[in-house]
Amino acid sequence: MVKGCECTIVLKTMNKVFSIPYFEETIRNNYILLHEEASIEGNGVCKAIQKNVGVTGCIVTPLSIKTVPFLLYLALGSAKEGEFLHVYKDLYKYRINLTPYELTESFDLIQNRDGSKRRYDNCGVDGFEMRFERENAVKLKMDIKGAIEVFEDPYEDTYPIESGERFNGDNVKYHVDGFEYTNIYGATVTVKKTGGTKTEILINRVISGKEYFLDELEKLEITGTLLKDRYENRHLGTFRITARELKLISDETNVNSAGAIMGQLRYYVSGVLFAEVFIPGEECII
């Protein structure tokens, strides 16, 4: 694990260049071993050749008002045309759908770690995790995979970090089948795309013995909101994750307690997963 402000990560697509803020990154060369088995007549020594097959690792970054549309598009994979909201002047609403592809929109990744700049071409996101927790920033962990070998970046360009106001878990609301639940402490959305898309949601809730969840949920909405009043009716400072047809996998709640306790529920998402984001009209999501 590599930490520190001396390392920056830049993501480049055909139309966008983002230098993203992050907490951790583990981007590195991905190697495999080509084995050569020992011959029957020989001395029994196996040999192996190391081969560079691209890039692997992950990036953990906080979500902000500027980075949410771009990063969620890279993670989920497919965005529809923006819907113009006439009531809010030049505001557009975009729906970003989770696609069942192992790698979504390709991008170049430039890593500047302690003055050593490397570029990884043709990368993609083959899995991600969104973490919502009170008293912490909302974070996105993207698992990066690429099939092109790594080489030194020949460009000397510098890119300003896209900061903006960050979303916080204290301002996240949870609606289950149309009803808001205030006893949910946090949630984690995990998506793996290798070998077929698999989505799970872990819900952490505080219970006192009376609250309960059903084994099947029709719809779960997780809405992150910024507090500033300067956004268009708070729509611009809002994003929403919607999951449908959730099936309970496990209940890890310990009910042998007299007071309030923390319980964990793990659901499998058998339906669709999508996000809604809002951006000004002069900007484009991709």
Image: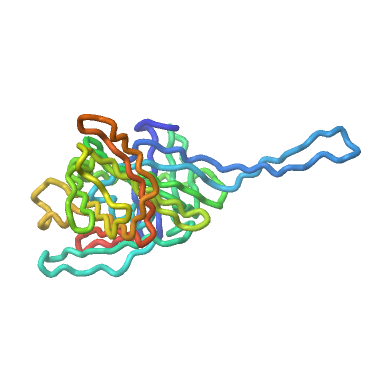
* In-front residue for pair 167/284: 167
Tell me if residue 95 comes above or below residue 109 in the rendering: below
Which residue shows up at 17% across the image and 55% down it? 179
Q: In which quarter of the image is the C terminus?
A: bottom left
Above or below, comparing residue 245 to residue 145 in the picture? below
Residue at 11% over, 64% down: 88
Q: Which of 160 and 178 is in front in this view?
A: 178
**Frontmost residue, 219 versus 263:** 263
Q: Quadrant of the N terminus?
A: top left
Q: Residue 229: x, y in percent? A: 8, 49
Q: Which residue lies furthest to the right in this view?
A: 41
Find residue 11 and report its horizontal and vertical position in percent: 39, 50
Tell me if I can see residue 168 in this picture. no
Query: Is any part of residue 58 visible from this angle?
Result: yes
Residue 183 relative to residue 11: left or right: left
Count of numbered badges drawn on the protein: 0
Using the image, determine if residue 283 lies above or below residue 267.
below
Q: In the image, 144: left or right of 257?
A: right
Report whether 151 appears left or right of 89: right
Residue 176 percent location from the top left of the image: 23, 54
Q: In this view, does 85 lie to the left or right of 111?
A: left
Type of colouring: rainbow
Q: For the point 77% across and 42% down, which residue is it? A: 36
In x, y percent, where is residue 163?
26, 44
In depth, the one of 84 and 218 nearer the eye is: 218
Splitting the image into 4 quarters, where does residue 281 fall? bottom left
